[in-house]
Image (cartoon, rainbow, N blue to C red):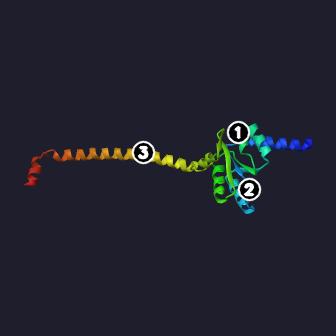
Amino acid sequence: MPSNKVLEQKKQVVAELAEKIQSAAAGVLVKYEGITVAEDTALRAALRKAGVEYTVMKNTLTGRACDIAGYGDMKQYLSGMTAIAISQDDPIAPAKIMKEYADKINSFEIKAGFVDGGILDQAGVISLAETPSKEVLVAKMMGSLMSSLYGFAYVLQAKIDKENEGGADEAANEPVETTDDNAAAEA
């Protein structure tokens, strides 16, 4: 039977993980098997660079933390060697990075995830990973807005040009008044 000290340490670990999960923008559970040290090092570096925290923890502790955080349904995905990647800011980063590595490493597999208080299955996490980044979405939106404004500006300019042409045609069709000085100069 574990000592009280060990139990208190585990309770502390569970409480910390639960707090991270509750305050996270998103997280992804992965099957953490068959990954080499070099691949693990590269994965952790990519996650750190994106501001994603990556933890390998016993499934029972992760399950308890999920219960506390309100994601108790995720416990069904906790079997085998499982790791969790949590992002406090970017809801897409953990899914993107984990999918990238799951595509490279056959034994590395996405199990499930969570975002905005909801649980995602494997297909949901993969779909989330394929979502363009915030910068790309903003650029697309700005491009759409700008193209509409450019179209509006072209229509206005065409109307102005047409009115100016119409005014020039009317001026050309008006009779020119001649004075005696002009008539003498023309003769």
Element class at badge 1: helix
Number of numbered discs present? 3
Amino acid on which disc 3 is placed: Ser
Please state which amino acid type lies under the numbered disc 1.
Answer: Asp
Q: Quadrant of residue 13?
A: top right
- Above or below, 44 relative to 118: below
The x and y percentages for residue 41 are 73, 60
Could you tell whether 58 is left or right of 148 in the image? right
The residue beneath circle 3 is 148
**Residue at image coords 74%, 50%:** 82
Few, some or many residues within 10 Å of mark 2 (<14, 14–19, 20+): some
First along the sequence among labels 1 and 2:
2
Q: Nearer the viewer, residue 55 or 167?
A: 55
Mark 2 = which residue? 33
Relative to the observer, which residue lies in front, 117 or 186? 117
Q: Position of residue 143 (x, y in %)?
A: 47, 49
Residue at label 1?
A: 73
* Residue at 9% in and 47% down: 180
Q: Quadrant of the N terminus?
A: top right
The residues tagged by marks 3 and 2 sit, at their Cα atoms, a distance apart of 50 Å
Q: CA distance from mark 1 to mark 3?
A: 45 Å
Amino acid beneath label 2: Glu
Asked if one can make out residue 71 in the rendered structure from this viewpoint, the answer is: no
In the image, farthest residue toward the bottom: 38
Helix, strand or loop under label 3: helix
**Image-based side of 7 in relation to 184, left or right:** right
Using the image, determine if residue 40 lies above or below residue 74. below
Give the CA separation, mark 1 to mark 2.
Answer: 23 Å
